[in-house]
Amino acid sequence: MTIGDNVKHKNNRKILAKAWHDFFILGKENISDVDEIILQSWKRSKGIDFENLLNLPTDKELIANSKRKNHILIDIAKPYMDDLYKIINNTNFMVTLIDKEGYVLEAIVHPKLVENTEFHLANISEDRVGTNAMGTCLYINKPIQTYGEEHYHKTLHHFTTSAAPIHDGEGNLIGAIGITGFAYDVSVHTLGMAIAAAYAIENKYKLFQEKQNLLVKGYSNLINYSTSDGVIILDSEGKITSANKHAENILGIKNEDILYKKVEEVLLGSIDFSKYLKSKEDRFNIKAVLNVNNKNISCNISLIKLKSDLELMGYILMINKDQGPNINIGRQRSRLYSFEDIVGESNIIKESIEIAKVASNGNSNILILGESGTGKELFAQSIHSNSHRRNKPFVDVNCGALPVGLAESELFGYEGGAYTGARKEGQIGKFEMANGGTIFLDEIGELPLSIQAALLRVIQERKVRRIGSTKTIDIDVMIIAATNRDLFEAVEQNLFRRDLFYRLNVFTINLPPLRDHKEDIPLLINHFINKYNKLFNTKIEGVTEEVLNVFYNYDWPGNIRELENILERSVQVANSKVIEIRDLPMYLRMKADNENIYKSNISLLDFQEKKILEENLEKNKRNIKLTAEILGLSRATLYRKISKLNIDVERYRL
């Protein structure tokens, strides 16, 4: 019966049983003792086996696919199902959630029902089992209650079910929720409960869709029109919800084959996605070797958290292929950066450049330390370009992307037939490729311990021995290593060899994060806008004051690379001559909204003053009285500046 009907007391099952027998056994058409909706469903059910309930061989796989596809619906519905079951727990009922095709997604069953039921259906659509509240509810797209012999199938004659359809935000049917119990426990109240639960699930689902649509809309240009990046969108649980054509091409996959699967099930290899998804950081830039369909792919990956009102909505993965070792000799030298390419006028950047120039004049091992996106490769290439080795090879090796089993052969080479699968002619290693020039060991902190010992020997002896060979080969290379890891801590935790660390740590260059030299942001903005104007044939002239305020107040976890990525996107989507707030990525706009920093009064000069104050406070062991005296300020003035510049006053004492 439907919600608009007056609920009848169904205490005379003999009438229903006779009507069922007359219609299905005797073939009578004129049945007057059955609700019209039930009678129409009976007519649709004719021809279905009403003696046996069988699951099809394909049901198991179809249910698994449906659960993957409808995991958001399941996650939203589960708490309401739990609450509903607690209310009806004493009445021997069960609560069931099905998808729009009738497949069972979730069920909470009372033990007494389990004891007295011999069937376990995978699909309860009307096409499969005939008239039943949940299947018929899907067909008529309305709430309904079925009782006893109103069910088509004989096995269901002992039960009653109340069911209500569930719709998404656009009114599309996506499933149904039902309450099932023994026929003698039939109650009008269960139909109302099912309707209320469906309504609550719909509202929650609609809210989720609105937020999801907002995020997708904000990244639609990036997803659809990215010039080279593969883009994959994940939900808050790390399940893939969409991927663009570039992602399909880079990874050799089809969108329909990966949808609703967890990212770590699809993208195997050297990266532990769960570690990054669980991290408190909002963005990561990672180099890794992905294994997709048994094929290794070296990739550069940017992982960005998507948030709305501080709530995690999902993630965006931007993927492009790592082209492997960058070998530059002779006429190819123009591909390398030089110190003139480094943008920045802050003292901290100038100091880094001066140290790097000094390092370029010698042959000592160089270790570049800095967070991801600070320009470690830019500095490494500039050092090579400024050295006497400038016309010799520059070989770039991503240590984090080296497969563990092949790392030694990649670095040091091998003789023909050295191992199964090796080339007959053998292969020279990266150190031999770099002979006379420079080898850049990027992400050295990711190098496996088993390879670190071999690397240490090469650095000490300046000789390499190919795998499978007894001969050693002299090498003359400048070694530049770089990492975003804290190698001091890694050494203490026995994750990095102490002797190798000290061999590399002869000439150390510390690159500052962008948050420590925000005074360079205007120069960087101009540089990247000019770069992408030429690339995309656009004529963007700059950014608005509001955008500049957002940039000044942002912490830049992805550093200069993140700023470049944002400006690359913004140059393409901007509708005016300047980049506006609406042109920024969604995650940055949301952060600005939450912190209300569009119209911040903090200027570039303020940031410089803030840095001076913080440096002096730290130098004076956070003593405000002493700091004020050194700076020639009264304590009241110093406190006022601390307040204006958002310096944490609680950290400092008199």
Image (cartoon, rainbow, N blue to C red):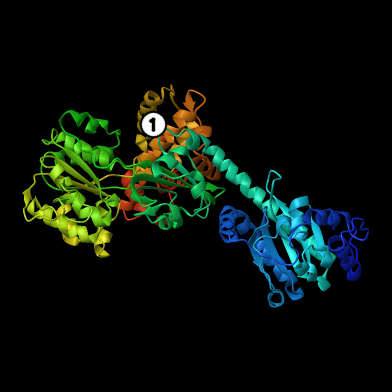
Viewer-proximal residue among 372 and 624: 372
> Residue, x 49% and y 30% (percent of image)?
573
> Residue, x 23% and y 46% (percent of image)?
397
Of all residues, the one furthest to the front in this rendering is 26
Residue 442 picture location, percent across and down: 25, 47
Residue kind at label 1, given as amino acid type? Ile
> Residue, x 36% and y 27% (percent of image)?
531
Viewer-proximal residue among 147 and 152: 152
| 565 relative position to 474: left or right | right
How crowded pointer 1 is (Cα within 10 Å; few <14, some 14-19, many 20+) is rated as some
Residue 44 shows up from this direction? yes
Q: Residue tagged by mark 1?
A: 525
Q: In this view, does 152 lie above or below 239?
A: below
Viewer-proximal residue among 362 and 642: 362
Q: What element carries label 1?
A: helix
Which quadrant is home to the C terminus?
bottom left
Residue 603 picture location, percent across and down: 43, 35
Q: How many marks?
A: 1
Residue 575 picture location, percent across and down: 52, 25
| 471 relative position to 412: left or right | left
Which quadrant is home to the N terminus?
bottom right
Residue 351 shows up from this direction? no
Quarter-wise, where is residue 23 in the image?
bottom right
Residue 19 picture location, percent across and down: 89, 63
